[in-house]
Amino acid sequence: MVIILFRVLIILALFFIFFAAVQYIRSPQRKIQKAKEMYSFYFLDEPEDNKKNLQFTYKGCLFEGEKYLGTTETAFEVVNIDVTVRRPIELRGITKTDLAFLEEEILSKYPYATVNWKHPINQLIEQEEATIQRIK
C-alpha cells in the first residue's frame, strides 16, 4: 500500500515539474527578457485588453507604452499611445530611424493611434526638428 502511494506521489511530482517547465517556456516576460538580452525586436501586447500596457524591446532597450481608448469615426479604438523607457541608459545607440521603425510597428497594430514619445526619447526627436529648422 505504501509503495503504491509513493508511486502516485512520484507521478504527481513529475506531472507538476513538467507543467511548471511548460509554463516557464511559454512565459511572455521570459521571452521579452530573452529578446532584450539578444538585442532583437520583440513586441508583447494583449490587443483585447486596453488596460494592459504594451511592451517591446529593440536593440537591448525595453520600452513600455500606455494605451488610451478613444473614439474614431466608426468605433472605439486605441487612439493614443505614450511610449516611455524604463531605464534611459539603455537608449544608447538608438537613432531616429530606429524610432521610426518602432513607430511603424506600433501603427501596424494600432492604425488609429498617435504615438507620443516621452522624456528622454522626445528630446532626440525635438533636437532633430530643431536641426532641420536651422538648416532652412
Image (cartoon, rainbow, N blue to C red):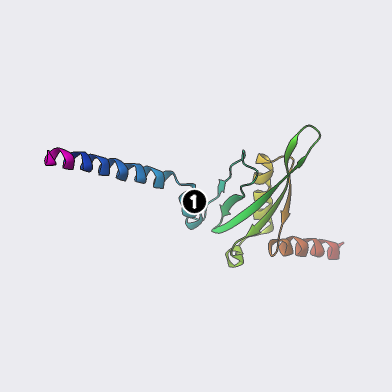
Q: Read off the magenta span.
A: 1-6
Split into 4 quadrants, where in the image is the N terminus?
top left
Residue 38 in percent (x, y) is at 48, 55
In the image, 52 versus 130, the foreground residue is: 52
* Residue drawn at the location 79% of the way across and 37% of the way down: 72
Instruction: Pick whichever, 16 or 106, lies toward us.
Output: 16
Position in image of residue 42 (x %, y %): 54, 48
1 is higher (above) or lower (below) than 36: above
Above or below residue 49? Residue 86 is below
In this picture, residue 70 sits left or right of residue 45: right
User: Residue 28, position in %: x, y?
Assistant: 49, 47
Question: Seen in the image, is 34 located left or right of residue 128?
Answer: left
Which residue carries the number 1 mark? 29
Residue for point 77% across, 62% down: 126
Q: Residue at x 61, y 47 (%)?
A: 52
Q: Nearer the viewer, residue 93 or 116?
A: 116
Secondary structure under badge 1? Answer: helix
Tell me which amino acid carries mark 1: Gln
Residue 2 lies within the magenta run: yes
